[in-house]
Amino acid sequence: MKLKAANTILYCKKWNETVAFYRDGLKLLIISSTDWFVEFKLNESARLSVANEARTTVKSGEGKGVTISLQVADVDEIRAEFVEAGFNPTPIKEVWGSKATYIHDPEGNRLEFWSGRAKA
C-alpha cells in the first residue's frame, strides 16, 4: 500500500468553536471548507478535519478515546505559546523518552505536543 496522505476527521457537536480553535488558536492553514466541514493542513502529507456532527451520520466521540499526537521542534516553546494564548497546557512531562505537554480542543479531544527522542 502506498499512502499519499493521512487525514483524521473529528466529528463535533461544538463545531464552530472547534473550527475556531484550530483556525484561530492553533493557526492551522485551511485547505478546504464548506458550511459543515473544514480540512486543515498539518504538514505536506497530514491533515486534520473537523465535521459538524449535525450534518453527518457519524456522531461526536466527545473527546473520549482520542489523542492527536503531534511532534514539534521545541515543546517548551509551544507550551509557552499555549500559556500566552490561554490554552491551559499541562506541565511538561517525560513520555517514552520525550518531553510532552497536552491541551484539549473545545470538543474535548486531547492534543499531545512532544519533542525529543522519537517514540518507540
Image (cartoon, grey):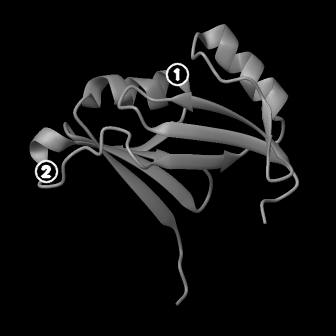
For the residue labelled by badge 2, is the local secondary structure a helix, a strand or a loop?
loop
Image-based side of 7 in relation to 14, left or right? right
Image coordinates of residue 98 in percent, x first then y, are 83, 47
Check the image and name the residue furthest to the bottom.
Answer: 1
For the residue labelled by badge 1, is the local secondary structure a helix, a strand or a loop?
helix
The residue closer to the viewer here, 66 or 20, is 66
Image-based side of 13 in relation to 75, left or right? left
Image coordinates of residue 78 in percent, x first then y, are 74, 27
Which residue is painted at 45% across and 29% down in the image?
105
Position of the C terminus by quadrant: bottom right
Q: Quadrant of residue 111?
A: top right
The residue closer to the viewer here, 73 or 106, is 106
Image coordinates of residue 53 in percent, x first then y, are 18, 43
Which residue is painted at 44% across and 38% down in the image?
109
The vertical placement of 20 against 45, above or below, is above
Say few, some or many: other residues with alpha carbon within 10 Å of mark 2 (under 14 / 14 to 19 / 20 or more): few
The residue closer to the viewer here, 34 or 98, is 98
Q: Are marks 1 and 2 in contact (CB under 8 Å)?
A: no
Q: Earlier in the sequence, mark 1 or mark 2?
A: 1
Q: How many marks?
A: 2
For residue 56, the mark is 2
Which residue is painted at 84% across and 35% down in the image?
74
Mark 1 and mark 2: Cα distance apart in space: 25 Å
| Residue type at numbered disc 1 | Gly
| Residue type at numbered disc 2 | Thr
Which residue is painted at 61% across and 49% down in the image?
69
The vertical placement of 34 against 3, above or below, is above
Image-based side of 48 in relation to 85, left or right? left
Say few, some or many: other residues with alpha carbon within 10 Å of mark 1 (under 14 / 14 to 19 / 20 or more): some
Image coordinates of residue 103 in percent, x first then y, are 57, 28
Quickly name the residue at label 1.
25
